[in-house]
């Protein structure tokens, strides 16, 4: 009976800490003369903003323009780019546990209602999805809350495709400078596109 208990506990812990809960790491690769960033755990491929032309024209834009930017993107020989989900964006966060993937912030594909921002808070002054006190003090270049592989460019709010399910015309964004996850309107608000594709 004891052996069965130990085996069950071992399997439970392995499941809890297994591949679904591994911290993502990234490497930069050059494909067809363009840099991409690839996640070791998810295998997702991200556009890297190192090309001079990207620097000159990429700006914070409305949700529709961000979606169109990724849909029309030809980068590193691929044309199947798209905007990421909030879960996918959270894999990029580095240096602030609450907003990192599997952190205390409950906004995820499993919890997209407005109230998810405050779930898990210890009290009314605790905000698991926001860290306004430490803006620009992340471990990445320029104080961004991402690893050095992401460079310094376009550190700020990024669109996700994840809708706020308790509101109309709102999407969740992730700000890599603050860092924070919050909701904004798809029209009249702007954020950066960060295009991704399945490898």
Image (spheres, rainbow, N blue to C red):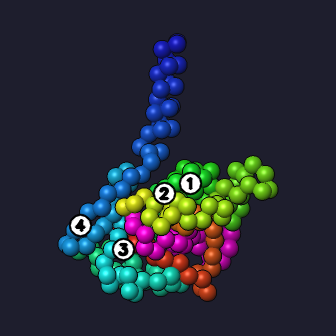
Q: Which labelled disc corresponds to residue 49?
A: 3
Name the foreground residue: 129 vs 6.
129
Q: Residue at x 32, y 57 (%)?
A: 27
Residue at the (35%, 70%) spot, across then down: 48
How far apart, in angstroms, are the residues tagged by discs 4 and 2?
Answer: 24 Å
Q: Which residue is mark 4?
A: 30
- Expressed as whole percent of the image width and height from the top left, the position of residue 117 reads 68, 61
Give the residue at mark 1.
Answer: 96
Q: Is residue 64 visible?
A: no
SS class of the residue under badge 4? Answer: strand
Q: Position of residue 108 (x, y in %)?
A: 57, 58
Residue at horizontal 48 percent and vertical 67 percent from the top: 142
* Mark 2 burial class by Cα count in 10 Å: few <14, some 14-19, many 20+: some
Residue 125: give x, y in percent of width and height. Answer: 78, 56
**Direction from residue 77 to residue 20 in the image, left or right:** right
Q: CA distance from mark 1 to mark 3?
A: 23 Å
Q: Is residue 113 left or right of residue 82?
A: right
Q: Give residue 46's position: percent from left, percent from top.
A: 36, 67
The residue to which callout 2 is attached is 139
Furthest-left residue in view? 32
The quarter of the picture where residue 115 lies is bottom right
Disc 3 or 4, which lies upstream in sequence?
4
- State which tag comes first along the sequence, 3 or 2: 3
- Residue range highlighted in magenta: 150-175
Dot 4 or dot 2: first in sequence order is 4
Q: In the depicted view, which residue is nearer to us: 87 or 31?
A: 31
Q: Earlier in the sequence, mark 1 or mark 3?
A: 3
Q: Residues within 10 Å of mark 3 (few under 14, many from 20)?
A: many
């Amino acid at each position: 009976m004891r052996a069965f208990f130990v085996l069950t506990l071992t399997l439970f812990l392995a499941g809890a800490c297994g591949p679904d809960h591994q911290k993502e790491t990234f490497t930069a690769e050059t494909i067809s003369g363009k840099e991409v960033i690839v996640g070791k755990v998810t295998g997702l491929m991200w556009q890297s903003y190192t090309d001079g032309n990207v620097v000159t024209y990429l700006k914070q834009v409305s949700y529709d323009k961000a979606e169109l930017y990724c849909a029309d993107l030809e980068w590193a020989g691929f044309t199947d780019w798209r905007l990421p989900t909030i879960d996918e964006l959270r894999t990029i966060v580095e240096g602030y546990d609450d907003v990192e993937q599997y952190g205390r912030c409950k906004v995820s594909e499993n919890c997209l209602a407005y109230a998810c921002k405050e779930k898990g808070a210890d009290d009314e002054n605790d905000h698991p999805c926001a860290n306004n006190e430490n803006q620009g003090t992340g471990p990445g270049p320029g104080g961004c809350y991402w690893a050095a592989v992401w460079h310094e460019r376009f550190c700020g709010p990024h669109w996700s495709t994840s809708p706020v399910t308790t509101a109309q015309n709102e999407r969740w964004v992730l700000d890599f400078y603050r860092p924070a996850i919050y909701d904004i309107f798809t029209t009249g608000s702007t954020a950066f596109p960060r295009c991704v594709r399945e490898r």
